[in-house]
Amino acid sequence: SRAGRRSADATPGPRRARAGGIPHRGHRRPGRAASPLREEQPDLVLLDLVLPGTDGIDLMGRLPELADVPVIFISGYDRAETIAAAFDAGAVDYIVKPFSPTELTARVGAALRRNLGPKRFTLGRLEIRHEERRVTLGGRHVPLTAKEYEVLRVLALNAGRVMTHDALLRRVWGEPGRNDRVLLRTVVRKLRAKLGDDATHPTYIFNERGVGYRMAGPPSQHR
């Protein structure tokens, strides 16, 4: 694990309130966020919904670096549709302004605890060792391409939940393109073939028609 806990935020300007006890690595403007994310590897990102020239939801789609970092949206908008769009983009929480430093600290702490995640995912004969990026089926290694593994990993980390097509595309490819759903279906088809998973009677990956995919759950997970 990384030494200590660090947070970063992409906002139009410095935040007015800082959460007590959370080491902070400064704010980043949207167009310059990718490089610091790669270099500093923050444990968590605070992302403003309204940003110069873009918005936080769009930024998440354009920055694959955000896929594996817990992102908390900060916004003055409390519309249900906006909040739902933020979660669909991959946010772990959404805080409506104004908020107290105490509330922010609590929510950041909860997000970090959830992000510790299991080191191993086990479902029947399928086992995924996240730290080793290794997948086995009945004890035998299953060779996967980078994209196949990422799709499987995202589904496993969200086992029991439906991952929409757009959410999967953002998490694995970055910003979705017009024909990317065809690419996603192709990757899932190849992934199922390697796992011996029958699409008509699946054991692992279920198709939610017109919506996305769901990994069976809850699995047995080990830290």
Image (spheres, rainbow, N blue to C red):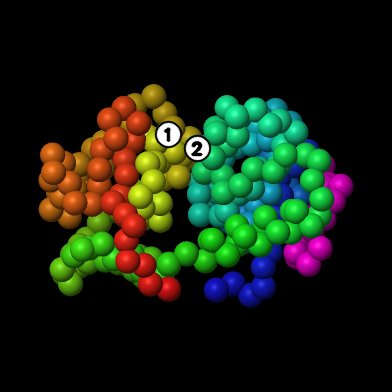
Would you call the spot at circle 1 few (<14 residues within 10 Å), some (14-19), or many (20 or more)? many
Where the C terminus falls, by quadrant?
bottom left
- Judged by its main secondary structure, the magenta piece is loop
Identity, as a three-letter code, of the amino acid under mark 1:
Asp
- Of callouts 2 and 1, which one flags the residue occurring earlier in the amino acid sequence? 2
What residue do we see at 34% from left, 35% from top? 212
Q: Is residue 42 visible?
A: no
Q: Horizontal and vertical percent for residue 80?
A: 60, 29
What residue do we see at 54% from left, 61% from top? 114
What residue do we see at 83% from left, 47% from top? 14
Is-magenta flag for residue 23?
yes
Is-magenta flag for residue 122?
no
- Seen in the picture, residue 43 relative to 63 is either above or below; the reply is below
The residue at the far right in this view is: 16
**Quadrant of residue 107 within the rendered picture:** bottom right
Identity, as a three-letter code, of the amino acid under mark 2:
Asp
**Pointer 2 with pointer 1, Cβ within 8 A:** yes
| Extent of the magenta region | 13-26
Residue on which the image places disc 2 = 88
Residue on which the image places disc 1 = 166
Would you call the spot at circle 2 few (<14 residues within 10 Å), some (14-19), or many (20 or more)? some
Q: Horizontal and vertical percent for residue 7?
A: 69, 59
- Seen in the picture, residue 44 relative to 96 is either above or below; the reply is below
Gap in Å between the C-alphas at discs 2 and 1? 8 Å
